[in-house]
Amino acid sequence: MTDMTICCDEQNGLFTLHTKFTTYQMKADRLGYLLHLYYGPRMEGSAEYLITYADRGFSGNPYEAGGDRTYSLDALPQEYPFRGEGDYRSTALIAENADGSVSTDLRYAGYHIREGKYSLPGLPAMYGQAEEAETLEIDLEDTASGLQITLLYGVFPELDIITRAVRIKNAGQQPIVLRKAGSACLDCVPGEYDLITFHGRHAMERNWQRIGVEHGSYSVGSRRGTSSHQYSPFVILARHGADEDAGECWGMSFVYSGEFRAEAEKDQYGQTRLLMGIQDEAFAYPLAPGETFTGPEVILSYSAEGLAALSHRFHRAIRENLCREPERETPRPVLINSWEAAYFDFTGETICNIAEEAAQLGVDMVVMDDGWFGNRSSDSSGLGDWVVNEKKLGCTLGELSEKIHECGLEFGLWVEPEMVSEDSDLYREHPDWAYRIPGRKPVRSRFQLVLDLSRREVVDYLFESLCRVLDSAQIEYIKWDMNRSITDVYSANSAQGGGTANPGAVLYRYVLGLYDLLERLRTRYPKLLIEGCSGGGGRFDAGMLYYTPLIWCSDNTDAIERIRIQHGTSFGFPVSSVGSHVSAVPNHQTGRIVPMKTRGVVAMAGNFGYELNPADMTREEKEEVRRQIREFKELRPLIHEGLYYRLTNPFEEREAAAWSFVSEDRREALVSVVTLETHGNPTTAYIRLKGLEKEAVYRDRESGACYPGAALMTAGIPVPAMSGEYQAWQLRLEKVESGS
């Protein structure tokens, strides 16, 4: 670990966090307020000179400032801004006192430094041993109410990552209600910025969007109970003009799977504030005397070398210090899922037939999707009854699993534990376990309601039910789905505890219940691979990746649509976390017909697999599948561990989409190109490569042609002419050794 990762100048109240290439600095000033000074390229010394003071109209002054009218929290950059001492901008903390007042005055109260990375009880977080990370805790206190705030900083020097979280304790004598409890704030004093966000909808997630940060505030977030298809809990603040290869940019990734809010605000003096935390619209979390609330973690990183370098830092951090063993080290299986092959219409024999065909193609695993349990022949019944439907399968689950393994394949199951159908034995026995507001009809979605995972007995039931299934057969994988947004939030259990059944508190406890359930399953079945899913990518966030290191990227399996979806996903999440499969044509979502080769090239930019029935393929298609699987398994280390480069932006460039993988030592590269438009008498498209060694020469492994690295990155390489729509071309390069 880098020497002096965390430095504290006690005399001047200066705290400095160093990573390999960055520095983060703050100061507890003469009045005890914690001011943010700097987050940028690594530097030595103090950046306190950046803060200016002036007598600004209608910006009030703390009482202790006395006659100094130049000191106002309404204009100063702060580390954890709060409502109550004259800051009228969006703040991280809003606390309601027992007398109904909304006022807090947080002053510096001390600090602690320790080796290793902090952990958060009940919440996912990056992890690191003493040789990898260091922790800084800064204590703030409101003496009037007894509210104590601990700001947590985890510093990963080699990753150029700093994490933030917050612990809030009511050490007073009266109850307090948290109305807002953000996890991280970044105040940027000078500069003009853009905000890059990722919006979408079901089957079209994480569309790239870049807008200028102007006066006022702009926010994205979720009110849906989960992180959602609509907005990603990952955002980037970038200098005007910063692009993939150059310029300053800061990223924030929320390690949480529930409602969130990210907000950028330019204030009256042209300063920019970026906030991230739990969605606060309906948030009201009660803290009785002695109780503590823990805010989820935010992963931060800074790059002075553009967006690609920023993405690489998040990719490595998630792969190496968020995803956990054994999945972190074990190659993911090439699987085939039964959903688009059979939907609900299957028997055990159907699954065995798919497995037999798949084994001949080189597939590693077959997954039996929805319809294997309870009275489940459509999406209108059966959820909650996690009992194997042996009549439908024609055998026990153990017998089916045995047959699958006899084919040489592993076996996986689809589950949706967080949901319940009204037409189910569970709902008939425990209707109060589902979210329903007394006296009101619930909002249905896909004919299902949401189970109240804030209740321990519900989590226990799900754990015991799933264990019975998993213990009955040899199962190596489960796909964990969640197919609706949450409404009608009311917990009878919480209401009995004193009227705390408000959406903010209940939904926070729901997420804790979900994490507890997943952690208990991971502990009992340490070799079980869990793939996350929420109608595809509706809960694609760093929090879920702690428990499910693989997430189904989208229910949209159209290869051309997936190019855009996977492009947006790549900014904050590694390729190794992306579930991406080849499906049948015409595509079941769009009706588009795309060549099998192209479908394979696109799906290889993720965890490769198939969503189709092998029996329906031609002999030529089966041979192509065999070739794809052989090629992917050979390339998997480069794809999952190499540096990912976005060579085009498919949201802006219409002719072709291109991306590449480059090994860390820059000795090997894989370039993928897909044509998006077809023209008569076309011009030649050139793709400029990235991440190569300028002084080196690279050889095309297929043709033997050699190219200078500098030319490949400056002038590019011509894409060969290809006839037909949506054609794909791949180029495998290897560095030429001296004398070869």
Image: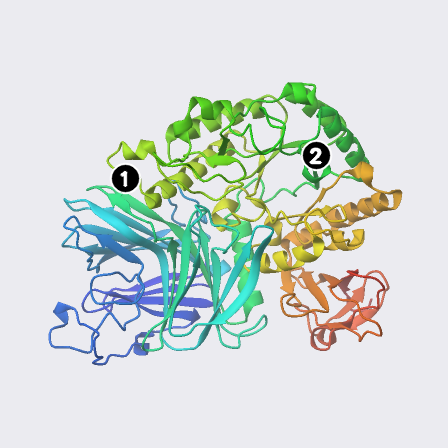
Circle count: 2
Q: Is residue 638 visible?
A: yes
Q: Is residue 193 left or right of residue 480?
A: left
* Residue at x 79% of width, y 53% of height: 597
Q: Is residue 398 visible?
A: no
Q: In x, y percent, where is residue 566?
A: 62, 56
Give the residue pinned by disc 1. Answer: 500
Give the residue pinned by disc 2. Answer: 366
Between disc 1 and disc 2, the foreground one is 1
Q: Is residue 614 left or right of residue 316?
A: right
From the viewer's side, name the closer residue of 606 and 121.
Answer: 606
Q: In x, y percent, where is residue 183?
A: 36, 55
Circle 1: element type: loop
From the viewer's side, name the closer residue of 407 and 155.
Answer: 407
Q: Is residue 697 above or below residue 595?
A: below
Query: Could you tell me how far apart the alpha carbons at marks 1 and 2 are, in whole angstroms?
Result: 45 Å
From the viewer's side, name the closer residue of 322 and 203.
Answer: 203
